Image (spheres, rainbow, N blue to C red):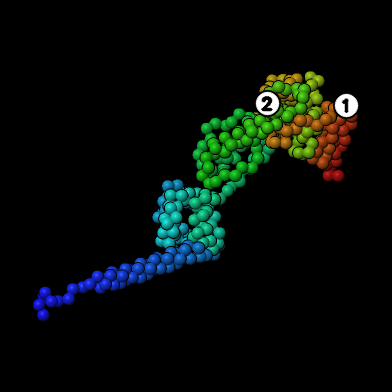
Amino acid sequence: MSEASAPKPGKDGLAKFLIGLVLVLAVLAVGALGAAYGGYKWLEARFEAPGPSAEDTVVLLPRGAGLIRIARQLEEEGVIGDRRIFRIAVTLDNGDRALQAGEYEIPAGASMARIYELLRTGQTVQHSVTFAEGLTSAMIVATLNETEVLTGEIAEVPAEGTLLPETYLVTRGTPRQEVIDRMAAAQDELLDRLWPSRAEDLPFETREEAIVLASVVEKETGVASERPEVAAVFVNRLRRGMRLESDPTIIYGISRGEPLGRGLRRSEIDNAQNAWNTYQIPRLPPTPIANPGRESIAAVLNPADSDALFFVADGTGGHVFAETYAEHQRNVARWRRIERQRRDGR
């Protein structure tokens, strides 16, 4: 047969060929998509499956660590089973730069998805640092220096009475100076809130003087409920031009707030050279004698409605109050009897 007489493919044949090709490609694409979807579901299942740890585990991730290092550390510390799955899943979520350094407590059996959420949102372990009311600034600095989860040095011991003692939450590696700054800011915020609603006709004019008196109240009683009454006694005495006659002020002048370890001597009470000796000076001491807590500050700004001018220990940890000196003397005599009975073992 000659070339001139050979049959040529018609338009119908070409169309069938193209349709077939498209069908083949479509089948291959669907297969690839199915395989990819199946792979994604497998990865998702592994990422959300329970982890290998049998107990809660504390993990400390260093600053500057990237995804590769973090995944390796998590696997080495036994909280994830496959670092590659963790890396792939985090990368697919664009979270490789969102992981935060710090100290984490990984719950027993936590999935990689749960661990990723902890690291992405920075849910680090919180440590509490507690400061008792009435500590001096030097004592607070000493406590911070002994707290091992903190870092760095404190620039200088803050002025007495400028810090608010309470419980503060910190993360491992928090600078010690940052805690000092938080304590000072907390006291400023408290005064900003309480100062405008203070009682009228108080015998002091500045917030600094309020803190001085609050520190005296703080050192005179550890019973929160009677702080407004103690504050009222000192406010009443200042209004009348009377001396505060507070033993803790003398002790502060002698030891700068450190425990004296003994009772006051008569010579120390009579010592007019001690600038904090409120048995000798008819005014507030020159500085606070400690860092007062919230209740003492609030009590000084709004003391109890009382005419009491005296108080003495009652033998139960609290105090008994009196408006007259004669009544006070009877209360003192009662306290002396209690002291003698305790010494005699009765």
* Res. 28 in view: no
Residue at 46% over, 58% down: 74
Amino acid identity at mark 1: Thr
In which quadrant is the C terminus drawn? top right
Residue 231 position, x and y percent, is 77, 30
Q: Which residue is label 2 attached to?
A: 207
Q: Which badge, 2 or 1, comes first in the chain's sequence?
A: 2
Q: Which residue is label 1 attached to?
A: 324
Tell whether 172 sits left or right of 209: left
In which quadrant is the N terminus drawn? bottom left
Tell whether 123 sits left or right of 214: left
Q: Residues within 10 Å of mark 2 (few under 14, many from 20)?
A: some
Residue at 51% over, 61% down: 111
Viewer-closest of 271 and 67: 67
- In the current view of this chain or complex, which residue is farthest to the bottom? 1
Viewer-closest of 71 and 274: 71
**Residue 216 sits in which quadrant?**
top right
**Residue 251 sits in which quadrant?**
top right
Looking at the rendered structure, the number of numbered marks drawn on it comes to: 2
Name above or below for residue 198 compared with residue 114.
above
Viewer-closest of 344 and 68: 68
Residue 293 position, x and y percent, is 69, 36
Q: CA distance from mark 2 to mark 1?
A: 30 Å
Name above or below for residue 10 compared with residue 102.
below
Residue at 65% over, 37% down: 165
* Res. 115 in view: yes
